[in-house]
């Protein structure tokens, strides 16, 4: 056995012997102790045999001495004349030659162009006329610090010195006539445009009377509607018309003296909301909570209806719309409108999505993990088809469109799962 393998073998054998001795001390029954005693004796014998074997191998592995012959054969000199030694030429030391090739001079760089410095000439000094004697300004006298003159005492006003009040019906002679004040121009009620007069959505069910104290609340609702419209990209023309129609519903329910102010303030708020773009979910949730804290049930329900109508206005559900709508409805606390119902209705009405779900055999009660795996496989299948050779251009466009719809559907289901 080699020495490298003998050391681990002896170690494990000793470890087994120690473990057997420990079990012998722990064992309670006499039959178990007799068995372990026999095992201990057998392991001791095996360890002794192993150590003896290792020692024998080490002795056998010792190098045997090289045998030396006892008698060397006799060498016989060759018969005949032996040539004497020849003189050699003296040793000449030669220096080592360099292995590198001789250096070559590279092409010289062209000389730099000479820079001509411009000479700077200063303008000549003007010739000033020689001052002539004449009138000169008299210097002001320096102020001298002296005692301040005493101020005259202020006259005291007594009540007896005041003029008596003018009798009723007579105006004071010295009093100026009152300044004429401009009469405020009466503000007429703004007329509702004709294209917004046919607004019949459920969000138009507003309170019969809306005052200026609810202007901030109506502005928040309008901002919430623009946030839902911008969740899938820029606000479209149809969505803008729907929000403006709701704005004019609010103006119509405002009193005559407040209608112009309400319309101007809401128009400014809508212009600001259009430039904000897509909002974060934290900002949308904060805005919905502020609307809910007002306690106006009709306006809160109108806000939920308006957001649902904006999401479902184009008849499709895009990534980002479900997350925004669910955040809005959760912040408003309305139970009548559910984001899941709107999402399922929009997905079922989309023909491309319906065809993919039908071909993939995806049902509503399927687990999200199974649904995600099936959509991933479908995307891989269409991706492999786009890489086929001699594929018509129409088929390539079709497969790429299917891949885009599947990617959108996976993103929507991911939002619904969260």
Image (spheres, rainbow, N blue to C red):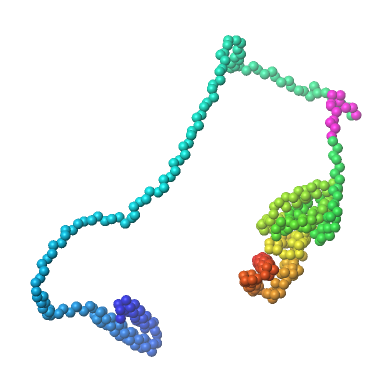
Q: Which residue shows up at 11% across the image and 77% down it?
A: 75
Q: Name the quadrant of the N terminus.
A: bottom left
Q: Position of residue 213 (x, y in %)?
A: 78, 49
Q: Position of residue 155 (x, y in %)?
A: 73, 20
In the image, residue 25 sits, relative to residue 251, either above or below, namely below
Q: Depth check: 271 or 307 in front?
A: 271
Q: Quadrant of residue 200?
A: bottom right
10 in magenta:
no
Q: Depth check: 48 or 325 in front?
A: 325
Magenta span of residues: 169-181
Q: Which residue shows up at 81% across the image and 50% down it?
A: 211
Q: Which residue shows up at 70% across the image and 63% down it?
A: 318
Q: Name the quadrant of the C terminus.
A: bottom right
In the image, residue 114 sits, relative to residue 212, either above or below, namely above
Residue 13 seen in the figure: yes
The answer to whether 1 appears left or right of 268 in the picture is: left
For this orientation, the residue located farthest to the right is 169
Total marks shown come to 0
Q: Position of residue 114 (x, y in %)?
A: 46, 37
Q: Position of residue 101 (x, y in %)?
A: 34, 54
Q: Which residue shows up at 86% across the image and 54% down it?
A: 194
Residue 217 seen in the figure: no
In the image, residue 175 sits, relative to residue 309, either above or below, namely above
């Amino acid at each position: 056995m080699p020495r490298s393998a003998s050391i681990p073998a002896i170690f494990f054998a000793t470890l087994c012997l120690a473990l057997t001795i420990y079990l012998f001390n722990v064992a309670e029954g006499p039959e178990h102790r007799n068995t372990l005693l026999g095992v201990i004796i057998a392991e001791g014998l095996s360890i002794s045999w192993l150590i003896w074997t290792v020692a024998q191998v080490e002795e056998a592995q010792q190098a045997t001495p090289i045998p030396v012959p006892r008698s060397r054969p006799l060498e016989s000199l060759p018969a005949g004349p032996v040539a004497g030694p020849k003189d050699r030429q003296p040793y000449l030391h030669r220096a080592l030659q360099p292995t590198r090739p001789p250096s070559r001079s590279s092409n010289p760089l062209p000389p730099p162009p000479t820079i001509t410095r411009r000479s700077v000439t200063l303008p000549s000094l003007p010739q000033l006329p020689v001052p002539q004697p004449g009138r000169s300004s008299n210097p002001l006298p320096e102020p001298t610090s002296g005692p301040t003159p005493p101020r005259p005492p202020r006259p005291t006003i007594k009540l007896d010195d005041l003029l008596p009040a003018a009798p009723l019906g007579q105006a004071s002679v010295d009093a100026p006539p009152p300044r004429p004040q401009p009469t405020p121009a009466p503000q007429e009620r703004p007329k509702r445009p004709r294209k917004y007069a046919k607004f019949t959505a459920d969000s138009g069910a507003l309170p019969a009377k809306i005052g200026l104290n609810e202007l901030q609340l109506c502005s928040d609702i309008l901002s919430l509607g623009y946030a839902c419209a911008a969740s899938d990209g820029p606000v479209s023309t149809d969505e803008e018309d729907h929000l403006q129609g709701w704005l004019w519903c609010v103006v119509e329910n405002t009193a005559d003296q407040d209608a112009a102010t309400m319309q101007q303030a809401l128009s400014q708020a809508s212009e600001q909301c259009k430039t904000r773009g897509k909002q974060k979910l934290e900002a949308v949730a904060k805005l919905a909570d502020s609307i809910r804290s007002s306690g106006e049930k009709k306006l809160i329900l109108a806000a939920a209806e308006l957001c649902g109508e904006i999401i479902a206005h184009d008849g499709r559900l895009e990534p980002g719309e479900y997350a925004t709508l669910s955040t809005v409805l959760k912040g408003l606390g309305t139970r009548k409108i559910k984001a899941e119902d709107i999402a399922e209705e929009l997905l079922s009405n989309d023909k491309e999505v319906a065809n993919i779900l039908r071909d993939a055999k995806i049902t509503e009660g399927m687990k999200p993990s199974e649904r995600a795996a099936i959509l991933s496989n479908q995307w891989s299948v269409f991706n492999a088809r786009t890489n086929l050779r001699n594929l018509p251009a129409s088929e390539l466009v079709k497969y790429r469109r299917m891949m885009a719809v599947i990617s959108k559907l996976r993103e929507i289901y991911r939002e619904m799962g969260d």
